[in-house]
Image (cartoon, rainbow, N blue to C red):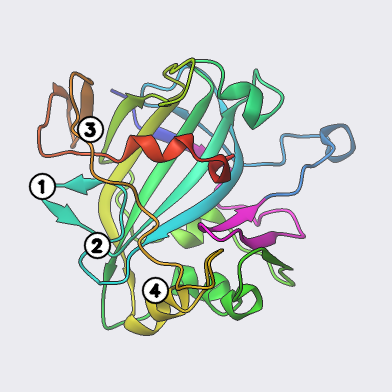
């Protein structure tokens, strides 16, 4: 299985970035760029692995818990990480993320894990220092700075990953998402995760534990790239696929 090609991940994201607390997660949306004016594919995109085409960046969001030993949507080898980041991409053949979710080859999500560490995770600094601007549910802020996706995942061995096809749990229940998970964790300090936990949800409570109940892998075929090509049905990899039924994912 080939590696994941992350085209444009080292480029600064187009300005302005919008950060939103929708009461369920923190999301960052990417402004659309007029390609005819730019003269090139300006937004980052991914290809390779088992992806059926090229997938353009749509945005990213996070999942975390109220305790350090839980927060991630996926569990690998019985480890549930403090936080998980999803970088969402849409197949270029579809115009919108909504349209893409209606097709089995529509969406690719790259998942990255954060593990508690004494040192501050440098990639999160920009996002973390602006979280106070969206302390309450349904608040949004325009960032006066930008960053690259590669800065968020600095230090991760992106040559090693798991990938599988995930499905929506609402009709038509099509397999629309190709998941690619990188098990090499990114550091996050106690102060950094605390800022996420200080956000409010739609009920004026703490925005925490925004992950779904763990689901079994079932009959899904899971592929692993660990330095050489191989197929596996790793039982240790579990996922929370049914969170996709909530409209805040869109």
> Which residue is farthest right?
37
Disc marking residue 225? 3
Percent across and percent down for residue 97 are 63, 31
Picture quadrant where residue 82 is located:
bottom left
Nearer to me, 117 or 150 = 117
Along the polypeptide, which appears first: circle 4 or circle 2? 2
- Residue hosting label 1: 77
State how far apart marks 3 and 4 are (Cα): 25 Å
| Quadrant of the drawing holding the C terminus | top right
Q: Which one is closest to the eye, mark 2 or mark 1?
A: 2
Secondary structure type for disc 1? loop
Q: Residue drawn 47% across and 79% down?
A: 198
The stretch of residues the image draws in magenta is 6-29
Circle 4: element type: loop
What count of labels does the image hold? 4
Q: CA distance from mark 1 to mark 3?
A: 16 Å
Q: Residue at x 51, y 28 (%)?
A: 107
Reply above or below: 91 against 44.
above
Task: Tell me the mark number nearer the camera, choosing from 4 and 2.
Answer: 2
Q: Secondary structure at mark 2?
A: loop
> Closer to us: mark 1 or mark 3?
1
């Amino acid at each position: 299985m080939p590696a994941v090609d992350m085209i444009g991940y080292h480029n600064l994201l187009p300005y302005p970035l919008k950060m939103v607390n929708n009461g369920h997660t923190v999301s960052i949306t990417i402004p659309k760029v007029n390609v005819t004016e730019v003269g090139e594919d300006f937004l980052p995109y991914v290809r390779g692995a088992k992806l059926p085409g090229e997938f353009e960046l749509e945005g990213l969001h996070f999942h975390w818990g109220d305790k350090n030993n839980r927060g991630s949507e996926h569990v690998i080898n019985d480890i549930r990480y403090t936080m998980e980041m999803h970088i969402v991409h849409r197949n270029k053949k579809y115009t919108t993320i909504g349209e893409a979710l209606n097709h089995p080859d529509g969406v690719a999500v790259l998942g990255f894990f954060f593990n508690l560490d004494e040192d501050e995770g440098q990639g999160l600094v920009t996002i973390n220092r602006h979280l106070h601007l969206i302390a309450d549910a349904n608040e949004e802020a325009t960032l006066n700075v930008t960053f690259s996706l590669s800065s968020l995942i600095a230090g991760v061995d992106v040559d090693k990953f798991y990938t599988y096809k995930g499905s929506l749990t609402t009709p038509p229940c099509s397999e629309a998402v190709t998941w690619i998970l990188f098990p090499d964790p990114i550091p996050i300090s106690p102060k950094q995760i605390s800022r996420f936990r200080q956000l409010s949800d739609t009920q004026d409570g703490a925005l925490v534990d925004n992950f779904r109940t763990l689901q079994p892998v079932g009959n899904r075929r899971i592929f692993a790239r660990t330095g050489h090509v191989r197929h596996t049905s790793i039982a240790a990899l579990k996922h929370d696929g049914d969170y996709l039924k909530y409209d805040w994912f869109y």
